[in-house]
Image (cartoon, rainbow, N blue to C red):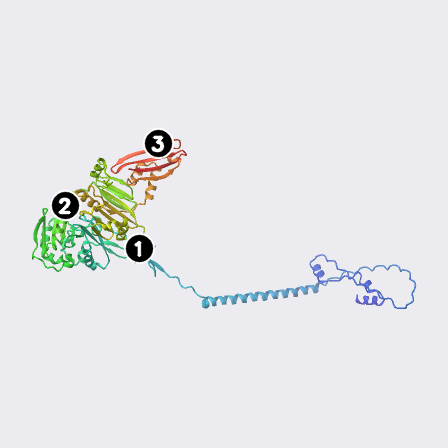
Amino acid sequence: MNKELGQKLKGGVPLAKLMEGVIIRTMQKDIAALKGKPLPPSPKLIVPKKKAPPPAKLPVAKPAAKPAPAAKPAPAAKPVLAKKGLKEWLEAATAKENRLKVILIGVTILVLIGGTGGFFYWWNYLRQLPPPPVVTHYQCQNFQCVSVEGEGENQCQTAEDCRPVEPTVPEPLIPVDEIQTIELSFGEEEWLSSELGLAAEERQASTTFRQILVKLVGQSEKKYMDLETLFSALEMDMPGNILRAVPTTPSGAEGENYTLFFYGQSTGNRLGIVMTIEEDSLDLMLKLWEEGMKTDLRPLHLSLKNEPAATEEFLDNIYQEVAIRYINFPEPTLSIDYAVVDDKLLIITSREGMYATIDALLSAEEIDISNWQPYQNEEYGFEISYPPNWETSGSFEEFSLISPDLAETQSSSDSTDIPSADIEIFVLQNPNRLNIKEFTKTYREGWFTNYLYMNLSGAIQRFSDLGASLEHTPLEAVFISANNHVILFSLHGYTMKNNETLLEIWNQILATFKFIEVRDAETVRAQIANDLREGDIESALEGFAPSEKSMAISTFNTDQLNQLADWIEKAELVEENDNYRIYRYTWTDQSGEHFIEFTMTKDGKGQWLITSW
């Protein structure tokens, strides 16, 4: 082909003519031919034509006639694709691509090996390990719930769990005017004698009894000291056969089978103890003990325990038909007197104290409280008993007791000097939880601190104007601390002044005081409301506290009202208008007259109201 092209060029054929119809073959067309695809059109090669300038000064010839157009040459045949060369090229390209893949895979493997090795090295040598978790458990320490390292069982979750349960306060075996508590830690019982010495120096009104409770306090337990521990702490001895005659209490509570007390007299406070006994032939055992009693019981004299005895032997005495054995040191104002009154053994350190204790026991026995009515204040957690013929009124915060004598006087006199009640019980708020001494200083601007006789004790404080000429009102006041409130007992003097029987009732009512479990008022209301919704009127009445003046309870839908339909029919319709109807059911018991009111509104809803008066 190249030879043919050269001959035509030599023959004077223009290059443009020669290149017409020539096809330029590219690799793209070769690949398309191998894949069986149609070939793309080849672009025509365009050779630019340039006009040469005519030579200068040439003769001008006449234009020749135009020659006839030459016939177009036949198109050149399409080149045949060289398959062998393309296959080799493709194999070479594929081999190159495979080499790239091998390189890539190799690099990837190297990266994986290096990364794994690096991770292994970091994990074992460079990694900063977190500190191991600290195993802890919770224990009670100093009444707080604290976290302690190490394995163990959790004793608490909050500080509340670490507060030991308060033990039941032992009931005094004789009527007392006040109660004082001495707290000692377990293991410090030997300090009791010193604490009693300090208590003996405290101010105490004459002819009054102050009970001493000894409470032992530990990390997880509080309890009152039992009789055997008491004798051991005071370094006193008691024969085993006499100690075994003192029974344990039915409830198992410590300290209920004895009462330790101070008796106030003009020559100083004197210590005494009363114990319950079960042995009928105790007189002989006591006489056999007399020789050792002089030394065994001398610690009861506290700071005066070294005073000499006036006689070598115990002597006889009789008071109110009670046989007494005694020995003076050297005067009757300091002695060891013992006597047995019914089921109680009395050991007192003065003659006056022995006489007063016998009087207290015999007078207390004359008042039968077996039929007294209980008053329970479940909202503030306390209880007392009062005579069945006394009238009552009030609510949880203010409760009054009215004797028959005062009730008769009120009905027959118009005097404004007549008090509304003989005894009033108030619940006073103490949000700052002041101790009882500080609270009484601030209450009514310290009114009670002006009283002539003032007795102080741990959680109880008693003020008295009995026997004085100050004419204070009330005659006596007793403050009892109870968490964030204070319970105040007030004795008014209109009927009780110079009336020993009523004064004994006052003391007996105070002696029946005890704390009970607090029953939340909202819980009470919810239970009563549920009983009423279910139509159980009897249960609702049982749950209703007569001391609460009024109590509104919930509303009821139509279905619940249908359950109460029978009861509403039995109740009295007391009021009716266009907007509502009021039904009332009334009943009377020993605590007064009460009623349940049910208001049915126009929209069909009901509202209960329980009231007592």
Q: Please, what secondary structure does the residue beneath circle 3 have?
A: strand
- Mark closest to the chain's N terminus, 1 or 2: 1
How far apart marks 1 and 3 lie (CA) works out to: 56 Å
Instruction: From the viewer's side, name the closer residue of 464 and 142.
Output: 464
Judge depth for marks 3 and 2 and give the one in front: 3
Q: Are marks 1 and 2 in contact (CB under 8 Å)?
A: no
- Mark closest to the chain's N terminus, 3 or 2: 2
Q: Which residue is mark 3?
A: 575
In this picture, is 557 found above or below 157? above
Left or right: 479 as drawn, with respect to 89: left
Q: Which mark is residue 162?
A: 1
Tell me the kind of residue under disc 2.
Leu
Q: Please, what secondary structure does the residue beneath circle 2 have?
A: helix
Total marks shown come to 3
| Residue 68 in sight | yes
Judge depth for marks 1 and 3 and give the one in front: 3
Q: Please, what secondary structure does the residue beneath circle 1 have?
A: helix
Judge depth for marks 1 and 2 and give the one in front: 2
How far apart marks 1 and 2 lie (CA) works out to: 44 Å
Tell me the kind of residue under disc 1.
Cys
Instruction: From the viewer's side, name the closer residue of 375 and 275.
Output: 375
Q: Which residue is mark 2?
A: 362
Q: Residue 434 appears at what percent x and percent y? A: 29, 53
In this picture, is 301 found above or below 507? below
Q: Quadrant of the N terminus?
A: bottom right
| Residue 279 in sight | no
- Residue 574, quarter of picture: top left
Left or right: 606 as drawn, with respect to 318: right
